[in-house]
Image: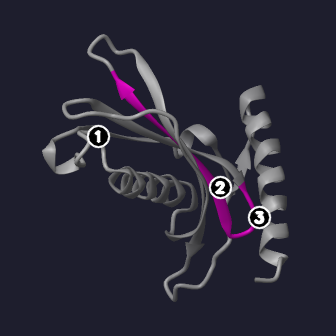
């Protein structure tokens, strides 16, 4: 079975309240990380048709802050699949009242699909349809190789 990138694309929208804000009147980084993990899980569940678990948070880059009453949009899509795992790219934006979006965070997570016994299970292959999707796949292959090399290093 195969699926397209657009088949599992997901978005989550938040208007920031005081409950999401730290002492500097900015969005808590940990709150954004929670939302990122949730969106990555939704993307991976939609792609795999299974429950998933987070295996790796490979890269999490904070580019700009978000403040109280900002609209934050967290978007996720599959960039790469292996036998039982999927790399998900998450981009987070602040959306202004005129609809313009500013990127505030980018993250890559590796999610593993699980069967009913919580064992890894095979996931559908990914259909690459655009030049952007091909470039994302190629970059993800490089990240996967780097992850493997880091994993093989001794602590």
**Residue with the mark numbered 2:** 87
Real-space Cα distance between discs 1 and 3? Answer: 31 Å
Looking at the image, do the residues carrying marks 1 and 3 touch, with CB atoms under 8 Å apart? no
Mark seen at residue 142: none
The first of marks 1 and 3 along the sequence is 1
**Residue with the mark numbered 1:** 26
Magenta-drawn segment: 81-95
Question: Relative to 138, is 114 on the left or the right?
Answer: left
Looking at the rendered image, the quarter that the C terminus falls into is bottom right
Mark seen at residue 147: 3
Residue 116 at x, y percent in the picture: 49, 84
Q: Is residue 52 above or below residue 2?
A: below
Q: In the rendered image, which quarter is residue 13 located in?
A: top left
Real-space Cα distance between discs 3 and 2? Answer: 12 Å
Q: Nearer the viewer, mark 1 or mark 3?
A: 1
Residue in the foreground of this view, choosing between 98 and 154: 154
User: Outermost residue, top direction?
Assistant: 98
Q: Is residue 99 above or below residue 78?
A: above
Q: Secondary structure at mark 3?
A: helix
Q: Nearer the viewer, mark 1 or mark 2?
A: 1
Residue lying at 74% horizontally and 68% vertically, measured from the top left: 83
Residue 24 at x, y percent in the picture: 26, 42
Q: Is residue 108 above or below residue 97?
A: below
- Quick check: can you spot residue 130? no
């Amino acid at each position: 079975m195969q699926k397209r990138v657009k088949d599992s694309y997901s978005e989550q929208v938040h208007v920031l309240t005081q409950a999401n804000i730290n002492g500097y009147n900015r969005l808590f980084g940990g709150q954004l990380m929670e939302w990122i993990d949730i969106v990555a899980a939704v993307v991976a569940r939609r792609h795999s048709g299974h429950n998933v678990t987070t295996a790796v948070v490979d890269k999490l880059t904070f580019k700009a802050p978000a403040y109280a009453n900002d609209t934050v949009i967290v978007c996720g899509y599959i960039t790469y699949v292996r036998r039982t795992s999927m790399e998900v790219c998450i981009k987070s934006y602040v959306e202004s009242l005129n609809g313009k979006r500013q990127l505030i965070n980018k993250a890559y997570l590796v999610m593993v699909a699980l069967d009913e016994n919580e064992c890894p299970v095979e996931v559908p292959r990914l259909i690459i349809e655009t030049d952007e999707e091909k470039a994302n796949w190629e970059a993800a292959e490089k990240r996967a190789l780097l992850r493997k090399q880091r994993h093989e290093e001794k602590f």
